[in-house]
Image (spheres, helix red, strand yellow):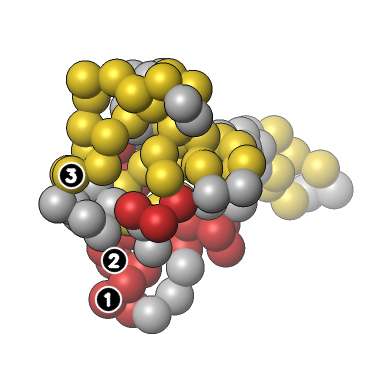
Amino acid sequence: MSEYGGKELVEYTKIYKLPNDALKLLYNRSKKDKRNYIKDYLDIEVVEITVPKSTVYSLPDKPTAMQLSEGDVVTVIEEKGEWLKVDYGADNPGWIKREDTK
């Protein structure tokens, strides 16, 4: 910390990504409190998987063996029509169907 005009200055670093465990914890707290802490403070868009299994695609027309489970929370990187490009942990981007989320 440093001082300016006799007052302490605090430096903050903008966070663009949270670890998945922290993301899910904050997402669930937001639902409980009916307040979107992630959007309000981090300006990150997240979605929750609402179907039992959601296939992850490397491209919108190329399915992979990876699946996300109901209740998983992922960060949205990009939107393209009915598809969402998401980061589902450890810098693993992939595409999921928008209809599989809320």
Q: Which one is earlier in the sequence, the residue at label 3 or at label 2?
A: 2
Q: Which one is earlier in the sequence, the residue at label 3 or at label 1?
A: 1
Q: Is residue 58 above or below residue 53?
A: above
Residue 41 shows up from this direction = yes
Which numbered tag is attached to residue 69?
none
**Disc 2 designates what residue?**
29
Between 67 and 17, the one nearer to me in the picture: 67
Between 34 and 2, the one nearer to me in the picture: 34
**Disc 3 designates what residue?**
53
Q: Is residue 95 above or below residue 4?
A: above
Q: Position of residue 45 (x, y in %)?
A: 53, 51
Write the residue at 62% across / 41% down.
80
Quadrant of the rendered structure where residue 39 is?
A: bottom right
**In the rendered structure, which amino acid carries the disc numbered 1?**
Lys
Residue count near mark 3 (Cα–Cα under 10 Å), binned few <14, some 14–19, many ≥20: some
**In the rendered structure, which amino acid carries the disc numbered 3?**
Lys
Which numbered tag is attached to residue 32?
1
Residue 21 shows up from this direction = no
Write the residue at 62% across / 47% down.
81
Q: Position of residue 91 (x, y in %)?
A: 41, 19
Q: Quadrant of the N terminus?
A: top right
